[in-house]
Structure formats: C-alpha cells, structure tokens
Image: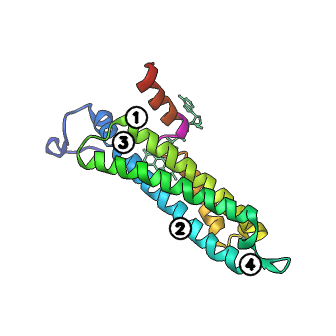
Amino acid sequence: MKLPLDALLGEEGKGFAYMMQELPRERLNIAVIGIYAAEGVLNGTIDYVKERKAFGAPLSQLQNTRFGLAQCKTDIECNKAFLNQCIDRYTRSELDVPTAAMIKLSSTDLQGRVADACLQMHGGYGYMVEYPVSRAFVDARIQRIYGGANEIMKEVIARSLVGR
Ligand SMILES: Cc1cc2nc3c(=O)[nH]c(=O)nc-3n(C[C@H](O)[C@H](O)[C@H](O)COP(=O)(O)OP(=O)(O)OC[C@H]3O[C@@H](n4cnc5c(N)ncnc54)[C@H](O)[C@@H]3O)c2cc1C
C-alpha cells in the first residue's frame, strides 16, 4: 500500500526497533492477564469443590483438593508480588527487557499450572466445554506462545546473564 510521506511515523527502516521498545509493556500486559485469569479460575474452582460431593462429602474436604488449592493460591500470591514490582518499575520507565521476560515467563507458566490443577479438580466435567474451567485451560495455553514464546523468554533472560 502506498502512503504519502507525511504519513511516516518516526524514521524510515526503524519499524522493528520501535516495535521492540514496546515489548516489555506487551509482556507486562500478558502477565496481568495470566495472574488474574489464574485467580479467577481458582475462585471458580473453590466454589465448585465446596458444592460437588463424592462419596458423601464435598471435594473440599479431601486433603488432595485442599493441598491443590493451597498450592495454587500460594503460587498466585508470589507472582502477584513480582508483578507489582514490575508494574512499579514500568511506571518509573525502569522495566528492562529481561525482567519483563521473567514476569511473562513466570506468570504464564503459573496460569497453565493453575488451569491444569483446577481442571483436574473438576474431574470429567472439567473437560466439557460447558464448564468455564475448560475454556480457561485452552485460553491459558496460548499465553505461553504469543508475546514471544516462553522458550524465547528464557533465551532473553539467559543473554542478560551470560551473553550470547
Ligand atoms: C492467538 C495469537 C495471537 C497473536 N497475536 C500477535 C500479535 O498481536 N502481534 C504479533 O506480532 N504476533 C502475534 N502472534 C504471533 C506470536 O507472537 C507467535 O506465534 C509467537 O511469537 C511464536 O512464533 P511462531 O508461531 O512463529 O513459532 P515458531 O517461531 O515457529 O516457534 C515454534 C516453537 O519453537 C520454539 N523456538 C523458536 N525459536 C526458538 C529459539 N531461538 N530458541 C528456543 N526455542 C525456539 C518456540 O518456543 C516454539 O515452541 C499471535 C499468535 C497467536 C497464536
């Protein structure tokens, strides 16, 4: 598509460099979505395990369920603490590329673990698309791919530690 010269944003040939400058913000956004989506699916699962009875008692009374919920909650709160630190750095224009990669990696891995654990607690219902946890599981999966795949996040972090 041809555009007039006065439609040029910035300097010619620097489009990729401009896009790269915004990647920490994109990765921070993905992290916010990841952590709060994880919290949402955990809250839905807490309601579910209190209601669903197996062998005469709610699933919430089983130690396996209780430990699973406790682990998810702990993981979410740890990631929130790091996220808040990253948001603080971002608002001061100090969020660097490796740190943004770390929160993207950590939060989206967390989201996947929580969605998987919560789906398991729903048993067979969790696999059915009518249940929100099923959709949450699918939605969690893309978070580790876009915004730069998590393997690329590891490479970015590693470069900041030991170079290329
Ligand atoms: C729903 C959705 C929305 C998207 N939205 C956008 C968007 O808005 N803007 C945008 O620009 N892009 C967008 N993308 C593209 C997305 O960023 C890419 O899919 C992603 O970066 C992975 O690139 P790829 O699909 O080409 O996979 P590939 O690069 O082919 O990677 C395939 C696999 O190989 C691994 N791999 C590749 N290179 C390396 C390496 N050097 N070291 C280790 N492992 C490696 C990857 O981790 C991955 O597991 C979107 C993708 C999807 C699916």
Provide the residue designation for mark 3. 23
Does the closest atom of ligand 1 sit within 8 Å of the Cβ of label 2? no
Q: Which of 112 and 66 is in front in this view?
A: 66
Q: Mark 4 points at which residue?
A: 52
Residue type marked 3: Leu
Real-space CA distance between mark 4 and mark 3, rounded to the nearest whole angstrom: 43 Å
Q: Mark 1 points at which residue?
A: 98
- Camera sees residue 108: yes
Q: Give the number of the mark in front: 1 or 3.
A: 1
The amino acid pointed to by label 4 is Arg
**Where in the figure is residue 91, as x and y percent of width and height?**
25, 50
Quick check: 73 above or below 51? above
Please provide the residue range marked out in magenta.
147-151
Indicate the secondary structure of the residue bearing disc 1: helix
Q: Mark 1 vs mark 2: which is more N-terminal?
A: 2
Could you classify mark 3 by the number of other residues whose Cα lies within 10 Å: few (under 14), some (14-19), or many (20 or more)? some
Measured Cα–Cα span from mark 1 to mark 2: 27 Å
Is residue 80 shown left or right of residue 16?
right
Query: Disc 1 beta carbon < 8 A from ligand 1?
Result: no
Few, some or many residues within 10 Å of mark 2 (<14, 14–19, 20+) = some
- Where residue 54 sits, quadrant-wise, is bottom right
- Location of the N terminus (image quadrant): top left
Q: Residue 40 carries which label?
A: 2
Place of residue 8 in the rendered image (x, y in percent of width and height, measured from the top left):
19, 42
> Which one is in front in this view, the residue at disc 4 or the one at disc 2?
4
Q: In the image, which is nearer the foreground, mark 2 or mark 3?
A: 2
Dividing the picture into quarters, in which one does residue 14 lie?
Answer: top left
Mark 1: few, some, or many residues within 10 Å (few <14, many ≥20)? some
Identify the residue shown where x is 53% and y is 67%.
40
Dot 2: element: helix
Left or right of residue 79, residue 64 in this image? right
**Residue type, mark 2 in image:** Gly
